[in-house]
Amino acid sequence: DVDLVESGGGLVPPGGSLRLSCSASGFTFRSSGMTWVRQAPGKGLEWVSSITGSGGSVYYADSVKGRFTISRDNSKNTLYLQMNGLSAEDTAMYYCAKALSTSWYSDQWGQGILVTVSS
Amino acid sequence: DIQMTQSPASVSASVGDRVTITCQASQDISDWLAWYQQKPGTPPKLLIYGASSVRSGVPSRFSGSGSGTDFTLTIDSLQPEDFATYYCQQGNSFLGLSFGGGTKVEIK
């Protein structure tokens, strides 16, 4: 079975940095595009960033471009999200998700990890 | 990024009702659209992709239609487990994989 487990969340002050990790198992990780999606408390889903299986192409939402960096280590079956310059607006549950086949639709999701930006 | 506009924001319905949710893209996205269902405290679940392809294991009462800028999710004969929030998402990476604002389906 596919399993995606996020880690690295927590409380960080405004302006701070955090790196999220997503450990994957149960599928051929290097062949799958991966995505980060976030959800602020009581709000809707917001796409954050996506990366192809090889890591050769990355995509970002305008709201995080220049501050967040997505990457992956296929030897460790792990996806990352480096978040810099955090603000209160980045407070959210962050989900990693696996892409369906060659599309960018997310067919498997982790349980999410909470990031809180506050002084 | 493309803007995805869902309507209504919420709908009250009874078990057995047909529910229709619409999603409008700010520009032509062909059939690059997915629908997700999310229940409180859980991650979203993919229901429909490619605008009208029902994911394996999803009940046949769920269907999707549309292309270009206008899309519809229909739930025939609403069941108790269908009360949730539904999101559309456009699936073209070059245009930003943005989500709609969500539609909450509530019990009447």
Image (spheres, coloured by chain):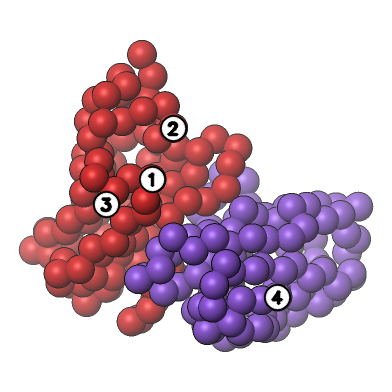
Chain colours: A red, B purple
- The amino acid on which the numbered mark 1 sits, given as a three-letter code, is Ser
Considering only order in the chain, which callout, 3 or 1, is on the residue closer to the N terminus?
3
- Residue located beneath label 4 in the image: B72
Q: Is residue B46 visible?
A: no
Q: Quadrant of residue A30?
A: bottom left
Q: Residue drawn 44% across and 32% down?
A: A89
Given the image, what chain letter belongs to the residue carrying mark 1? A
- Residue located beneath label 1 in the image: A63
- Residue located beneath label 2 in the image: A89
Given the image, what chain letter belongs to the residue carrying mark 3? A
Q: Mark 1 and mark 2: span between their CA atoms? A: 10 Å
- Residue located beneath label 3 in the image: A22
Q: Could you say where residue A67 lies in the image, as x and y percent from the top left?
A: 25, 41
Q: Nearer the viewer, mark 4 or mark 1?
A: 1
Q: State left or right for residue A105 relative to residue A13.
A: right
- The amino acid on which the numbered mark 4 sits, given as a three-letter code, is Thr
Q: Secondary structure at mark 3?
A: strand
Q: Residue drawn 66% across and 68% down?
A: B23
Disc 4: CA contacts within 10 A as few (<14), some (14-19) or many (>=20): many
Q: Are marks 3 and 4 in contact (CB under 8 Å)?
A: no
Q: Residue drawn 60% across and 37% down?
A: A42
